[in-house]
């Protein structure tokens, strides 16, 4: 991986030349102000109707459209609450362009407080279902509506995630490593502008980010910040980081004024990523349970945690760092199943420091 230039607002404030959508979106023609609508998907056996919520904040001045999606996974609540507060602070008289937000990408998974759509057949992870299929299962139907009514009408894309249930601590922004080179660099610039400690070139095949970067030719970033049920201190820390990240991103894209100069960050790709998963189920005693632990450079052999048998109280295994690496994912102490991601490292020898 080669170093990149520092992004500035001027670098990306003009929307890229994207493939034109087949049909116009009514919300693109709204005057200055705020609106909310629901995009119909299908009917449910409960007698209700499944729809996708769409918020639009339109500025007084011309500019690009930033599209944000959250809650594609139903147990990732923090981003949409951050977005709610952030949208309320936007001054439409100063805003250039518009911000369009799908506040709950997967209402069925969110209602069940679980990662995937609770349906009995087909692929049920909305995050892997794009561009969708209007004649597919319910998950594919939701993806198709999001694609046709939202993704096909934006100029920049942000797919905002957090750790789900399980006490996950993380702070990085992913971008699509399979995007065309020119778009990939614009994705990296967006990821850097968000201001998290790590930027990660990931394989995002099947995601909304992959669709917009490869089919529409527009850049995207995928923040992965914080988690669910972390307690007031950690939640407040990640709330503040996420709020600041959205402001920096909007500044970088030219929607608002401000400073989006990126901080010092670590960049890594899949070749330098290592997920550490216990071989046994049990109680994980984590030694890294604070947001400040994320980003630390740990030497090889560092003890990260232990897995304890809930029945015999025996220590089943110890989890240690296999190489010098930056900790970019950790968990609170708690029960884990065999194979659950407990920690994740970016190998120091393969990572690049971006200053």
Image (cartoon, rainbow, N blue to C red):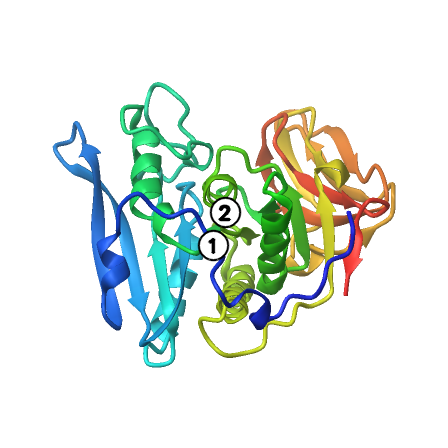
State yes or no: discs 2 and 1 in contact (Cβ < 8 Å). yes
Q: Which mark is in front, 2 or 1?
A: 1
As drawn, is 172 to the left or to the right of 24?
right
Residue 172 seen anywhere in this rendered image of the structure: no
Residue at screen point 71% across, 56% down: 293
Furthest-top residue in this view: 121
Classify 253 as above or below 337: below
Mark 2 crowd level (few <14, some 14–19, many ≥20, 10 Å Cα): many
The residue that appears at 69% across and 66% down in the rendered structure is 6
- Residue 90 at x, y = what percent? 37, 74
Residue 255's image quarter? bottom left
Label of residue 217 in the image: 2
From what the image shows, is residue 329 above or below residue 309? Answer: below
**Mark 2 to mark 1: distance in Å?**
7 Å
On screen, 159 above or below 339? below
Identify which residue is drawn at 32% across, 25% down. Answer: 119
Residue 93, how many percent across, how many down? 33, 81
Q: Is residue 134 left or right of residue 312?
A: left
Q: Secondary structure at mark 2?
A: loop
Which residue has dot 1 on it?
17
Q: Which of these two is toward me, 267 or 329?
A: 267
Q: Out of 29 and 303, give the one closest to the viewer.
A: 29
Residue 133 relative to residue 70: left or right: left
Residue 190: image location, x then y, percent: 57, 59
Give residue 247's mark.
Answer: none
Q: Nearer the viewer, residue 42 or 4?
A: 4
Q: Position of residue 39 (x, y in %)?
A: 23, 46
């Amino acid at each position: 991986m080669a170093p990149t230039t520092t992004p500035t607002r001027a670098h990306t404030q003009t929307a890229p030349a994207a493939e034109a959508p087949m049909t116009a979106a009514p919300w693109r023609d709204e005057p200055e102000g705020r609106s909310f609508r629901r995009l119909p998907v299908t009917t449910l056996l409960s007698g209700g109707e499944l729809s996708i919520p769409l918020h639009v904040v339109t500025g007084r001045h011309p500019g690009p459209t930033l599209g944000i999606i959250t809650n594609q996974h139903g147990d990732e609540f923090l981003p949409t609450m951050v977005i709610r507060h952030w949208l309320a602070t936007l001054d439409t008289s100063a805003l250039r362009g518009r911000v369009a937000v799908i506040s709950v990408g997967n209402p069925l998974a969110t209602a069940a407080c679980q990662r995937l759509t609770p349906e009995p057949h087909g692929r049920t992870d909305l995050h892997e279902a794009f561009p969708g299929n209007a004649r597919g299962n319910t998950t594919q139907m939701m993806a198709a509506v999001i694609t046709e009514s939202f993704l096909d009408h934006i100029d920049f894309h942000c797919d905002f995630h957090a750790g789900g249930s399980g006490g996950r601590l993380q702070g990085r922004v992913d971008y699509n490593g399979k995007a065309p080179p020119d778009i990939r660099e614009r994705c990296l610039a967006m990821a850097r502008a968000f201001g998290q400690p790590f930027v990660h070139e990931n394989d995002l095949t099947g995601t909304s980010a992959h669709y917009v970067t490869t089919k529409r030719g527009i850049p995207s970033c995928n923040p992965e910040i914080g988690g669910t049920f972390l307690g007031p201190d950690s939640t407040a820390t990640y709330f503040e980081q996420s709020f600041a990240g959205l402001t920096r991103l909007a500044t970088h894209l030219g929607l608002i004024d401000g400073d989006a100069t990126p901080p010092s960050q670590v960049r890594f790709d899949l070749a330098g990523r290592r997920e550490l998963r216990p071989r046994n189920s049990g109680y994980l005693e984590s030694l890294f349970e604070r947001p400040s632990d994320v980003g630390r450079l740990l030497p090889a052999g560092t003890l990260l945690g232990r897995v304890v048998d809930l029945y015999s109280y025996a220590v089943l295994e110890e989890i240690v760092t296999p190489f010098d690496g930056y900790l970019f994912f950790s968990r609170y102490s708690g029960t884990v199943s065999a194979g659950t991601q407990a920690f994740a490292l970016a190998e120091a020898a393969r990572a690049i420091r971006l200053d």
